[in-house]
Image: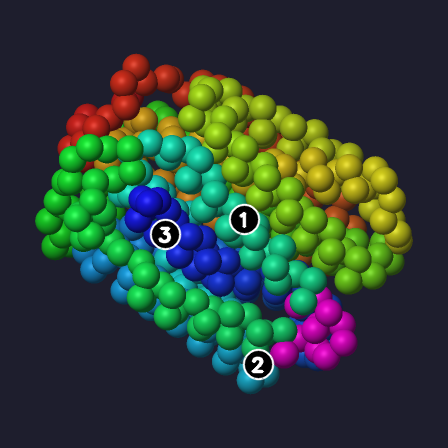
Amino acid sequence: MPHRAWLVVAVAFVTIIGAAAFRTLPGLVTDPLIDDFGWSRGTIGAAVSVNLVLNGLIAPFSATLMDRFGIRRVVTGALTLIAVGVGAGVLMREAWQLLLLWGVLVGLGTGALATGFAATVTIRWFAERRGLVSGVLTAAAASGQLVFLPLLSWLVVGHGWRPAAVTVALAALAVVPFAWLLMRDHPSDVGLPPYGAQEVTPPPAPAPGVARRALTVLARAARSGPFWLLAGSFAICGASTNGLVQTHFVPAAHDHHMPVTAAASLLAVIGVFDVVGTIASGWLTDRFDSRRLLAVYYALRGLSLLFLPMLLAPAVHPPMIFFIVFYGLDWVATVPPTIALCREHFGEDGPVVFGWVLASHQAGAAAVAFLGGLARDVFGTYDVVWYASGALCAGAALMVLVIRRRATPLPGRAAPLAG
C-alpha cells in the first residue's frame, strides 16, 4: 500500500493548481482593463507588483503559521481569501479597488500557498525523495497555468474579463473541501514515520510567536553569506519569470500583432514543459550539486531572453516554438535545488528561510512587473526589458557558483549557520 505521504502530495498538488489559476489572469486581461477603465499599463503593473510583493512577504510567515495552526487551516483560509479577492474584482470600478482586491487580498492568499508550502510538505513528510517531491509540487503551479490558460483566454476573448475572473474564484473554492478533508499536518498524526524513515517522531511543540520565529530565523540567516546569495539569485529568477514573461509576454506578443489566444497558448506550452523540467530538476537535485545545476539554469535562461526580441512576430514560427519549449523546461527548475540549499545550510529552519528567499523572488518579480509596464509606456517596446533580464540572469549564475558547499546538512533548527 502506498505511503500516506503520497496522498498528501496529491492534495497539495491540487491545492497549488487551484491557487495558481490567478497567476495566468493579469497578463490576459491587461488590454481589456485598459479598454474598460482607461488605466495605464503602469497602473495595472502596479497592482501586479503589490500582489507579488505580498505574495513573497507572507511566505515565511505562512511557514510559521503552518507550524502554529496546522497546514489544513492555513490552506483553507488562503484559498478562501483568493476566491473572495478575485470574485469581488468583477465589481471594481476604480484603480484603488484593483490594488486592494487583486493586489492585497489575492497577494496574501497566494503567498500562503507559494513554494514555501511545498517546502513545508516536503520536509515534514519525506526523509527520502525530497528533491523529486519538491519538483513535483513546484510543477503544480505550472500545471495550473496549463489547465487554466486556454480556458481563460477563450473566456476573455469571447465573453470578457469578468467571466474569466469568476472562473478563477470558483477554482480556488472548489479545492477547499479536498484540502480540509484529506490534508494532514504531520506523518505522526496518522501514526506513520515520514516516507523513507523508520521511526514515528512526534511533531515539535507549536512555537507561540509566529511572527517572532519568522523574524528570528531571518535575523540568524541574514548573518550568513549563502542566504544573501540565494536571495539575490532568486530575486533575479522571479524578475525573469513571474515578473517578466508571465506578466508581459502576452502584451508584448500582441504588440507584434500576434492574437491574444495564440500568445496565451504559447504560455500554456511553457506550462507543459515546465512540469517536465521541474520534475526532472528535482530528480537531478537528488543526485548532483545544486549550485552547479542553478548556474546552468540561470545561464541558459539569460541566453534565451537575449534572443526573444528577434523571435516575436504576428504568427507562431519554429524558432519561437523552440524558445517556448526551452524556456518552459527552465522556468521553475531553479526551485528544487534552491530548497535543497536552504535545507543544507539552515536545517529544519529551511522552510522558513526558503520563505524569505521566496520573498526576494517575488520582490524581483514585482519590480519587473511594474518597470516592464512602465518601460513599455515610455519606450513603446519591451526590448530593453528582455535584454536587461538576460544580463541579470548571467549575474545570478555567478552568484550561485560562489556559495560555499556544506560538508553535512544541518539536522536541527538551532544548529549554527554557515558563514
Which disc number belongs to residue 7? 3
Amino acid type, label 3: Leu
Disc 3 element: helix
Query: For residue 317: magenta?
Result: no
Query: For residue 155: magenta?
Result: yes
Image: 252 above or below 319: below
Counting from the top left corner in percent of width and height, residue 131 is at: 42, 33
Q: Assess disc 2: are there few (<14), some (14-19) or many (≥20) residues with their C-alpha within 10 Å of its C-alpha.
A: some
Reading the image, the residue beneath label 1 is 365
Quadrant into which the C terminus falls = top left
Residue at the (26%, 56%) spot, across then down: 184
**Residue bounds of the magenta highlight:** 152-163
- Name which quarter of the figure residue 166 lies in: bottom right
Q: CA distance from mark 2 to mark 1?
A: 25 Å
Select label 3 or label 1 by which is in front.
3
Counting from the top left corner in percent of width and height, residue 143 is at: 57, 52
Mark 3 or 2 closer to N-term?
3
Towards the viewer: 393 or 333: 333
